[in-house]
Amino acid sequence: MKPFRRHIFVCTGPRCTPEGKAAEALFQRLGELLQAEGLLEGEERVKRTRAHCFAYCREGPLLVVYPDGIWYKEVSEERLQRIVRGHLKEGRPVEPWVFHRV
């Protein structure tokens, strides 16, 4: 496995969004955005993984960024774009949407 700087988990469980459909679409869009920002290769590489449940049902889509320990809830397409640019690309969590820190 190639080394990576951050690992982002997206809850695609059936209770995060109805049947997990919107969360799965967000997971796919995340891949596109990571590619567009050049975050799938090199030292800043971000790995993405589907997760089944983070136990915050109906607050989704949920997204967790490690090793930062930052949790985001109710992630929309617009929010995802800002999280990718601000947090993953520039290293600044998008504070208005952070709801938990580990």
Image (cartoon, helix red, strand yellow):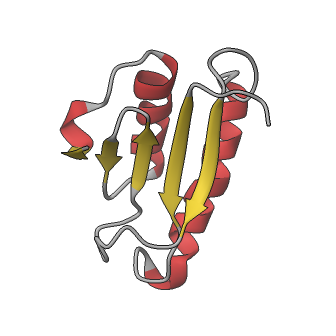
Q: Quadrant of residue 46?
A: top right
- Point out the image quarter for the N terminus: top right
Residue at coordinates 32% horizontally, 49% vertically from top-left?
72
| Quarter of the image with the C terminus in it | top left
Q: Position of residue 55 (x, y in %)?
A: 32, 73
21 in relation to 42, above or below: below
Residue located 61% across and 62% down the image? 25
Residue 36 quadrant:
top right
Q: How far across and how far down the image is residue 85, in percent?
A: 48, 24
Closer-to-camera residue (46/32): 46
Residue situated furthest right in the rendering: 1
Where does the image place residue 89, in percent across and percent down from the top left? 51, 20
Task: Kindly identify the residue that appears in the image at 57 percent across and 25 percent down.
Answer: 5
Side of 76 relative to 100 (left or right): right
Q: How many marks?
A: 0
Q: In the picture provided, is 70 more to the left or to the right than 65?
A: left
Q: Nearer the viewer, residue 56 or 82?
A: 56
Q: Residue at x 34, y 40 (%)?
A: 69
Residue 76 versus residue 90: which sits nearer the camera? Answer: 90
Left or right position of 79 against 28: left
Q: x, y (%) of residue 20?
A: 53, 77
